[in-house]
Image (cartoon, coloured by chain):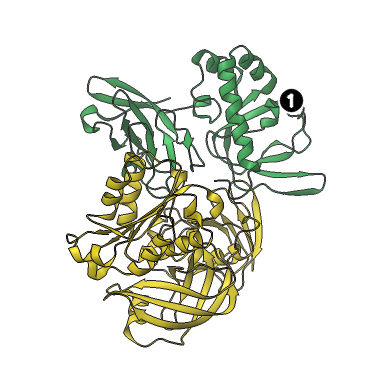
Chain colours: A green, B yellow
Amino acid sequence: MSRQLACKRSDVPDAGLKECGLEDGQKVLIANSGEDYYACQATCPHQEVALCEGLYDGTVLTCHQHLWQWDIRSGAPIGLAELPLETYRTQIEGDAIYVVSPGGLDLGELFSGIADATMGRIASLARTEQIGPGGTLYRIGDPADDFFVLQSGRIEFVIGRDDRTSPAGFALRKGEMCGWAALIDGQPRRIARATCLEATSVLRINGRETLGVLEADPASGYTVMRRLASLIARYLAPSGAK
Amino acid sequence: MRVELNARNRAYQFDAAPGERLLYAGLAQGIHLPYECGTGTCGTCKARLTAGEVEDLWPEAAGRAYLKQPGEFLMCQASARTAVSLEVPTFVYGIDPGACCPAPASGALCNPRCLTHDVMAFSVDLHRPIDFDAGQFVAMEFPEVRGYRGYSMVNFERGARRLDFLVKQKPGGGASTWLFNAAREGSNVKLFAPLGSATFFPGLAKNILCIAGGSGIAGMMSILERARQERYFQQHDGHVYFGVRTMEDAFYLEELSAFRRESAERLHVTIALSDAPVPPSARERYPDLDFDHGLVHEVAARHMKGRYQNIRAYLAGPPPAVDAAIRVLLLQAKLTTDQIRYDKFS
């Protein structure tokens, strides 16, 4: 986790947006909700359009290009958006706004925003693993005990059964998870092969132990399961579901 | 040429002939590749080449401004030189069974006629009939003018043998200059059709709001025609806002009046004049229409206050007018994005 100065509070208009360059060269978007300041990636995950040119009503940010929308507080997609925004925690000191880059589970699409204590327990289950280019995370038919959250690098999938396999398509992005069978009853085996296209860093987390943690905090468990359900549905949706 | 496409949800394979635009090849084979304008301006069909070689058919395309990373190109302006592998950053599904699958078509240009000093109507007699949905458009290529342009259908019928279009004369616009400057009757044109997702179906069962600037009224006329055929405005409300500069720039007022008269008074049509107050003669001549002075999105916002229940909005026109209307609908009217349909041309 790294903390960097983003801008001054006075730089961000009331209920407005401000794009800021960070010391490390990254850009972030700071949004003023009236009460709080939120920070997220500065460009739309769809077509890399600058989000500071978007529409913002104090809660919902809309990219003006194709009307993808997000809840600025969580980065969660709304409406037509197919991907979440990467968010950063903000810290206010006097007039200065600092942003803290996310890391670990925090950037995961599944867990962001759940209770801190529960997040901490799941984080304690996670082991970081580095895999080289061409390395295999799992093969079709392997036991599905663990799931993975991508920290950096790229993972590609081949889906299938027996000899009939086909490429699943695009590679995973940072923060996305794979191996969700580990969180679902009655799915003991992998149905895909996951291969790392480049040097890749993942968090490996045991599914059964995670379910145990979530059973002790049903509110967080409900959030995670809802997200997991919509994640899976996204891959099953018929065309024109938008 | 074999094309392998990796989308975020799965992979697809399709074939593209030499010189065939990759976007059109994929769409014609039932793969709903991402696009909006289909003609090189919006940047939505951006893809990344991971293997093989493509030919860029229009290196000056405005949509190239959206290309950021090495290897990126516009599928609507590229053909395959070799077998290629592409990546697109979105979810891609098959085209809905039952939707009109786009395909190459051709026809003869006919009946060009001026509606105002800078808006012309023309038709294309198709060599083979096509099906399209109300609100869709075609990509059209004229002889002697390089590349395709998008034009929305004005008419609506199934198995259409003739398509009606509007074109606005743009200073320096290659296609509109070609159309306006000489008698083009009988010229052969190439089409790729139909395109676009700003479609209307009677099964929608919502009140509809159309906000159009200038020649953007074309697709709205198609929607109104389909609604008329299905007696849609016996059951639902319609609100049409048509923005032009002055009465001299207005057209289709008789046609819009006729739609209104057939609607059990549930269709309201307002002409918004941006550059001049409403002359008294306008209301006398067109008693079925309303007139107001102002930019079309401002007029619509004033009139529509409190009338956004169960609504679907269709937008078309010059990009700044569409953007302004989106702003009003999202920020003032608090519509959600899935209630708004438009096809982006910039």
Residue A107 percent location from the top left of the image: 49, 29
- For residue A123, say whether it is visible: no
The quarter in which the C terminus of chain B is drawn is bottom left
Left-right relation of B116 to A137:
left
Left-right relation of A32 to A66:
left
Q: Residue furthest right?
A: A162
Left-right relation of A80 to B173:
right
Q: Nearer the viewer, residue B282 or B66?
A: B282
Left-right relation of B302 to B201:
left
Residue A111 percent location from the top left of the image: 54, 25
Q: Nearer the viewer, residue A200 or B335?
A: B335
To which quarter of the image does residue A153 belong?
top right
Q: Nearer the viewer, residue B21 or A237?
A: A237
Write the residue at 36% across / 80% down. Answer: B113
Q: Number of numbered discs present?
A: 1
Residue A15 percent location from the top left of the image: 28, 32
Kind of residue sitting beneath label 1: Asp
Write the residue at 51% across / 74% down. Answer: B191
Residue that label 1 marks: A185
Label 1 lies in what chain?
A: A
To which quarter of the image does residue B64 belong?
bottom left
